[in-house]
Image: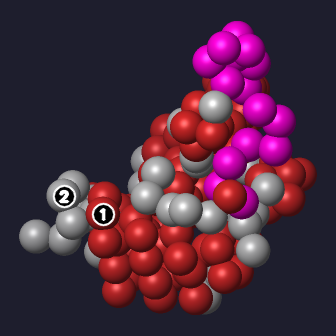
Amino acid sequence: MLPFWVLILSFSQISCNSLCLQWELAYEGEVSSSETLSELLQNWPLSDLVTALIDLYFLHCNSMFPLLHRPTFGRHFADGLYEHNIWFACLCMSVFALASRYSDDPRVLLDEPVETPVEEQSEQSRWQTAGFRYYFSILGKIVSLRIILKDSVNHRSRE
């Protein structure tokens, strides 16, 4: 049986006009903001770090909880789906956030240190923020997309 995300990504290639109900179109983000996607891509890691984080994700995370099919994910990533599809871009950022825990690259850390009492500040507490930069960048995007979608659904229901 294929993992859940493979099914989602495979169906995203098919025209939803014949397969999807209207509420599915609204929920899945037929209405999306290109501004929101471009803001997300501004926080995208450099390509060498992306490759390392994807490898770390599939080595440490996906091996225990196999949610993603690596060949399908890799194909969609190589095709640049993250540049056009906000949901796939958020999935990639989630992969980066989870994999950051296993990385020793300082680029996965927050630029601004988390406020902690002086006696608790240490290199270890700094490394506890690994992946937060990717998590925080998608957190606001998902909330704003839900607002866009909710407004779109409310607008359609009034018509």
**Disc 1 element:** helix
Q: Quadrant of the N terminus?
A: bottom left
Q: Identify the residue at image location x=74%, y=50%.
A: 32
Range drawn in magenta: 107-121
Is 62 in front, or is 90? Answer: 62
Relative to 38, is 119 above or below? above
Question: Residue flagged by tag 1: what amino acid is it?
Answer: His
Instruction: Give the percent coordinates (x, y) of residue 138.
Output: 66, 43
Q: Identify the residue at image location x=18%, y=58%.
A: 64
For disc 1, the neighbor class at 10 Å (few under 14, some 14 to 19, many from 20) is: some
Q: Identify the residue at image location x=85%, y=59%.
A: 42
Q: Identify the residue at image location x=72%, y=66%.
A: 45
Is 144 in front, or is 52? Answer: 52
Is 102 in front, or is 96? Answer: 102
For disc 2, the neighbor class at 10 Å (few under 14, some 14 to 19, many from 20) is: few
Residue 131 located left or right of residue 6: right
Residue on which the image places disc 1: 60
Instruction: Give the percent coordinates (x, y) of residue 10.
Output: 39, 74
Question: Residue flagged by tag 2: what amino acid is it?
Answer: Met
Instruction: Give the percent coordinates (x, y) of residue 149.
Output: 67, 34
Q: Which mark is residue 64?
A: 2
